[in-house]
Amino acid sequence: MSIKITREEKEHRQLGLVIEVDEARFQQEMQKAARKVANQYKIPGFRKGKAPYNIILRHFGVGALVEEFVDDLGQEMYKTALEQEEIEPYGIGSMDNIEMDPLRYHVTVPLVPEVKVGDYRSLRVEEKSVEVDEAEVQARIDQILERESGYQDVTRPSEYGDLMTVDVKAVVLDADGNETDTVVLDETDWDITPDEENPMEPAGFDAALLGLTPGDEKTFEIDWPEDSPSMYAGERVRFQVKLHGTQAYATPELTDELAQSVGPDFETADDLIARIRENLQEELSGEAEDEFLDSIMEQLVEMSEIDFPPAAVEMQLDQMMQTMDYRFRQMGIQGLDAFLEMTNQTAEAYREEQREEAEKVLQRNLVLGEIAVAEKVKATDEEIEEQIGVMFGELDEDATEEQIEARKRLVEIMKEGSTRMSVVEQIVTEKTFTLLKALARGEDIPLPAGDDENDAPDADSPASEEPVAAENEDASEPTAQAADDSPAEDVVAEVEG
């Protein structure tokens, strides 16, 4: 079926299409819609489904009949237009407007981004050197010692900050200094910590507890201040205290024994310190490597010309939201929606907050993909199989034959379809990063071999697929379609069982 199409070039890699439905097809759809409406509603003077077309049209109007088919026809016309004009969309098209008399659909189609990468092979980036700060090593040691710290029994005289277990009885005195029946305190095995900065009432009580050793008994009198909000304001109170035990907060020294308690890999304190220093070096080196790569990608984007449709940013946002949902579930939170509800955010506002980052990630991915194509970076079958093996880890030594066979079947399943594409993308990305870092360091990297029949993009190279293919298998449809469930889920259950 040939249809009349007018193309309208738009900015940012978008193409406008005006798709006009010919009169014959329009009338055909109107007749079908009229029959459908007639079978659904009773029209006065006619049995259901028996009213003639002109009566139905006069009774319901053109607009009501058009509503019955306009969406389905629009999708059909859009798909036909893409085939007729040989247009490969980058993502899902959007319906902008619908005109009547004649029926015209105005559609915007996102096109594949255009990327012109600068002279990336001449790019040089200074790499930051890292050195472990011994103060940070000590800070890590202090953290370990703090975890091992705690209260320990002591026999020395009590001090501020000690945890004291006491019996306390306090009684109000009369004007002659005799005890009355008014009891302020009567506590047994009371845990209390004298505090110099924030003493208890009445003033002087904390200080009176100092200098005692376990077994000591002490009697002292304190005048409650006149301006105290307490009901005992202005009263003189006699305290009788008996100390049962004192504990002091102590931080241990780093000894071989303590190091051994931290983990089985440490025989001495020096072993533990060496591992701390090694871990810090790895962390700093990793951070420096990330900064190095970040600087490379930032400069590559700056030196490149990149043009992409707005739909590409939306696709990147979709992917980021899916990733965040997965991460929250790994953390034990019931997905992104649950997190947004907990933090009083809307999905729309959260998505908008991520827009700038999504555009940044998109630009870097587009540049990276273009370089991967230019350098003919590919993933070999061996690399794919190895990566899939890493994803599953090693089977337990006591794994059953059924578990071993189930794992083999699962690996074979993952070597095909969308999972394979994801693994290939991961491998190619890492290999391209490695290449770029080597170039930025000034290493001599040979140019890729010239094009020949063996250099053509294949299924294991991102160059052979449009980026949208991994997101939507049928990008020509104006609406997204859900992917089929994977048979891999049943095999996973066998392996884990």
Image: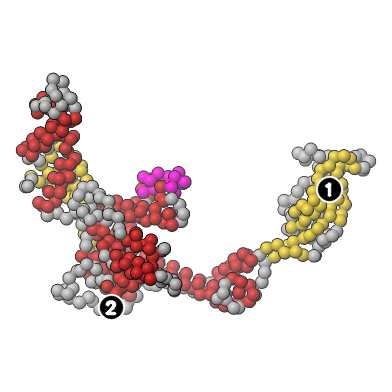
Dots 1, 2 in contact, CB < 8 A:
no
**Which residue was labeled with disc 2?**
445
Q: Is residue 348 visible?
A: yes
Image quarter of the C terminus:
bottom left
Q: Which tag is nearer the camera, tag 1 or tag 2?
A: 1
Above-or-below relation of 232 to 389: above
**Image location of residue 370, percent across then percent down:** 24, 65
In this rendering, position of residue 450 left or right of residue 172: left
**Which residue was labeled with disc 1?**
169
In which image quadrant can residue 99 be found? top left
Q: Check disc 2: other Cα within 10 Å, few if <14, some if 14-19, many if 20+.
A: few
Magenta segment: 338-351
**Image location of residue 237, percent across then percent down:** 85, 44
**Image location of residue 426, percent across then percent down:** 32, 66
In this rendering, position of residue 267 left or right of residue 40: right
Extreme residue in the top direction: 45
Give whichever of 494, 342 is nearer the camera: 494
The disc labelled 2 sits on which kind of residue?
Ile
Q: Is residue 479 magenta?
A: no
Give whichever of 211, 8 is nearer the camera: 211
- Secondary structure category for the residue under label 2: loop
Q: Is residue 342 magenta?
A: yes
Above-or-below relation of 341 to 266: above
- Secondary structure category for the residue under label 1: strand
